[in-house]
Amino acid sequence: MILSLNVRNLAVVEDVALDFSAGMSSLTGETGAGKSMLVDALSLVLGNRGDANIVRHGAERADISASFDIQHNSSLQKWLKHEELDDADNTEQCDLRRTISNEGRSRGYINGHTATLTQLRTVAGHTVDIHAQHAHQSLTQADTQRQLLDTAAGTQILLSDLATAYHQLQKYQRERDTLTQQNQDRTARLELLSYQVGELKQIELSDNHIQQLLQEQQQLTHATELIATAESGLNSLFDQEQGSAYNLITSLLNTAEKQLEIEPKFQTIVDTLNTTVIQLDECGHELRHYLDTVDSDPARLDEVETQLTTLHELARKHQVEIEGLPAHYHTLNDELNTLKNLGSHTESLQQQCQQYTAICTDLCQKISTKRQQAAPKLANKITDLIQQLAMQKGHIEIKLSPLEHLTASGADQVQWLVSTNPGQPAGELGKIASGGELARISLAIQVVTANSKTVPTLVFDEVDVGIGGGIAEIVGQHLRALSKDRQVICITHLPQVAAQAHQQLQVSKVQSKNSTHIEIQQLSEQQRIEEIARMLGGVKLTEKTRSHAEEMLQQAQS
């Protein structure tokens, strides 16, 4: 349950600290005092979205924190530990904090650890269920009606399993349909690919082979020039009778060696000349070997150029560079192999579709069974309550019809029908019930379905609008009954409801010359009498009104 809520700089809230107790707590105050602002603050700290507009004027940021007693909330304890968001020193309490700057930046914290809004909302799912004052506006929507029945039927786990299986089914169906579409063009594409791959396969298309051909073409084209260069070089280095490089260097080497005894500094020159002679010998060997192996071969040049011409024609045909032909061949060959295996892959996907269709169908049947079992019981409970809420002849029916196709939420169309007058056939809520009747039906549904929920705290934000007198007292009694098993926090304008609470908090708006803020105080027994009297009698209180308020409070607490 929630232990405390602290709010700073949120709209008209300057600095408010609230402590809550077990049982039922009521928040009362004049219209416009800011009671619902506290529900907004709770929603924000539990992960609802907010923007810079909610920050109090002149403040840097709004700051909201809340503490929860989770000693009996084992599921939340396990989740916090798994997410490493637990407080090792106090595993029985969970502290949340949310800040929103005046520039719109938002930060969340769980037990001092930075947390995302999704993580805050996960904590909310384990701790608080907020019933808004305008909940009846969504009651006519099919999704809302189905979700209300599912809450009472306890189908959440089955629905989660169904959503997972249905997601997989859709995935395999999309893949199958894509392949089926591809299969329609498969024959023509297979023929084209087979021809293209066969055409390229006849030619050696390795990267090395193409590079070797290009290099060989250059060498053969310039063979005469290359041979002349090698012969000229060999002649200059070794073969000319006078002035060959080799003779000149060896002559200088011999002379320098003879002078070493006179000039030792010539040793470096001698070493360099020896190295040069060795390198010249190697160069001469390479030139002679080149001349022994190279030849001007016009026939081979024609053969190489014929191969390259064929490769260039293929490259133009396939709109790639000649060097890109090998990669292009592998791409076409891979696509050809994929298309050849398309039939077996489609069959495998079809089997997956059948498997997950069977899983989804089985889950839908189980969900339908639970809904069918829960629907009449839930309808009877709501009917009993709305008849207590000044709809003596009102009657609720929950109708289930099979859908043509299964969905992620089952295979049932869930429709809530109402009859408000004797002899009148049941019809759709939005068409039969008036606005006031719809609000009372919504309140009855919220009270009845609250028993099916496992969260420890229920918040009712002015859900009792539009009722009064004895009906208001009945509503208060039902809310107090709910508080036997969980914490109930109720924002109300009705004294009959406020009197039923174990704890009453008064919200008031304080205005000064330059600012407005709200204040909250927990009321003593005598203060509760004064507040309930105000709610009963307005501005001017009489002893009779106070006496009535005291009697109402005593009866409620007894």
Image: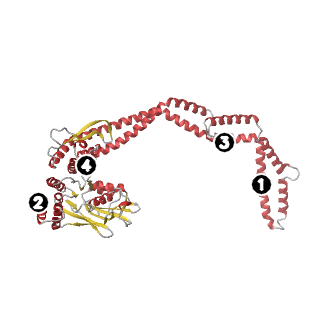
Mark closer to the chain start, 4 or 1: 4
Mark 3 = which residue? 211
Mark 2 = which residue? 555
Q: Amino acid at mark 1?
A: Ile
Vertical comparison of 253 with 316: above or below: below
**Gap in Å between the C-alphas at discs 1 and 2?**
121 Å
> Looking at the image, which residue is at 33% across and 58% down?
44
Q: Would you say 178 lies left or right of 395 here? A: right
Labels 4, 2: front one: 4
Residue farthest right in this picture? 242
Mark closer to the chain start, 1 or 3: 3
**Gap in Å between the C-alphas at discs 2 and 3?**
102 Å
Mark 4 = which residue? 136
> Looking at the image, which residue is at 15% across and 55% down?
469
Mark 1 = which residue? 278
- Mark 4 packing: few (<14 Cα in 10 Å), some, or many (20+)? many
Q: Would you say 549 lies left or right of 403 here? A: left
Q: Indicate the secondary structure of the residue bearing disc 3.
A: helix
Q: Amino acid at mark 3?
A: Gln
Q: Quadrant of residue 259?
A: bottom right
